[in-house]
Image: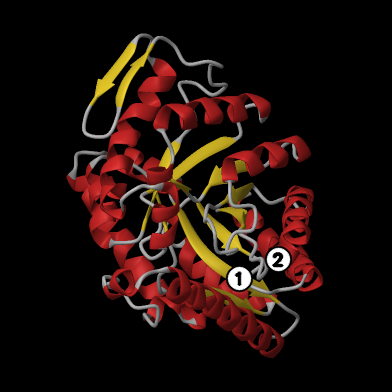
Amino acid sequence: MKFSNFLFPQSDTPDTDHEVVTDALREAELTEELGFDGVWLGEHHIDGACAYVDPITFAAAVSARTERVKIGFAAVQMALHHPIRLAEQIALLDNISKGRIILGIGRGTAYNFYEYRSYGIPFTEAQGRLVESEEILPKAWTTENYRHKSEFFDIDLPVLRPKVYQSPHPPIIRAVATEASMIEMAKQGRPLMLVVQPDDETERRFGVYRRTLAESGLDGESVERVMAECWIWRNIYVADTDAEAEKLATRVHEANRKHITDTRLRLNTAEEMSSVKVGLSDLRFNVENSMIFGSPDTVAERIERLSRIGVGGLILHFRVGPMTWDENEHSLRMFADEVMPRFRAIEN
């Protein structure tokens, strides 16, 4: 199993933006130093939930400061990007990083309507833009004189430069939240990133996903290959004792949820909020389901269960909410020193 650090740093006010962005770059360097397999970057706008906002620009800085770790996106909000512009940016990053890019894309947030309004993109177009862009991106990297005309994009592309570093192109993986989306990805034989879900539900859904892959015509080896390209996202905190970990994890989780909820209530319209079908009190958002926390032994037990699902890796969000640098660094180092080696030993 691969282990990666999801850099998604919260900045509560504009006055802390510089400090938080700078810390995130420092954390990327530490992540590589500690032997993690990858760094993942997210995208949110306006609200400070992700301080660096633009993962494409931030990825260039991360690439310049690292040499080995994969750099993934979890995920680019495809509705807010033109696919050819994104294809160019990813091609450049792929060259700068010498082939370390994983392009994770998604429809975009289901709750932050103010992001769509700020970009002048109707929320109702988000899914259609995602699906159409998924068709365009690989062809833009691999096809000369590429023509595409459909609902959202009319493209006449002679050739895309620079040429991507990876062959035939950087891997594309979709972030999903619903079982229906997982089944659709399985029918297409495509890997995915699953957002936070309870462990029981995660296990059940990947059972459905695996069966659907097989029913779609993939042989056993191909099923395992696709599963090995899938990722599960969790928030995490490792401390010396379970009690210490629970105390801090509960505090930062509650503060993070409050920041997100308060921002949505302030920036979304009443009509937009009334359209949200899944409430923010949903069980998958509670601390027990959305965070792995505890001593190294407790954390390893939780991860062992997820590892048996057969996915390729975990996207672990270490610096949750208002967690300090020292708290975050202690957790990162404990995980690298006392949890990761147990799973490396199994692989070896």
Q: Which residue is mark 1?
A: 236
Q: Position of residue 261 (x, y in %)?
A: 47, 77
Query: Mark 2 vs mark 1: which is more N-terminal?
Result: 1
Q: Position of residue 315 (x, y in %)?
A: 55, 57
Callout 2 touching callout 1 (CB < 8 Å): yes
Name the image colouring: secondary structure
Left or right of residue 258, residue 32 in this image = right
The crowd level at tag 1 (other Cα within 10 Å; few <14, some 14-19, many 20+) is many
What amino acid type should be assigned to the residue bearing mark 1? Ile
Which type of secondary structure does the marked residue at label 2 adopt? helix
Q: Quadrant of residue 7?
A: bottom right
- Residue 335 numbered tag: 2
* Residue at 72 percent of width and 40 percent of height: 61
Q: Is residue 186 above or below residue 194?
A: above
Q: Is residue 36 above or below residue 114?
A: above
Left or right of residue 289, residue 62 in this image = right
What amino acid type should be assigned to the residue bearing mark 2? Phe
Mark 2 or 1, closer to the camera: 1
* Residue at 36 percent of width and 70 percent of height: 269
Q: Position of residue 223 (x, y in %)?
A: 32, 44
Pick the residue in front: 90 or 220. Answer: 90
Q: Position of residue 314 (x, y in %)?
A: 53, 57
The crowd level at tag 2 (other Cα within 10 Å; few <14, some 14-19, many 20+) is many
* Residue at 34 percent of width and 35 percent of height: 134
Pick the residue in front: 270 or 252. Answer: 270
Pick the residue in front: 314 or 41. Answer: 41
Q: Quadrant of residue 310?
A: bottom left
Q: Quadrant of residue 298?
A: bottom right
Left or right of residue 174, residue 319 in this image = right
Which type of secondary structure does the marked residue at label 1 adopt? strand
Q: Is residue 96 above or below residue 162?
A: below
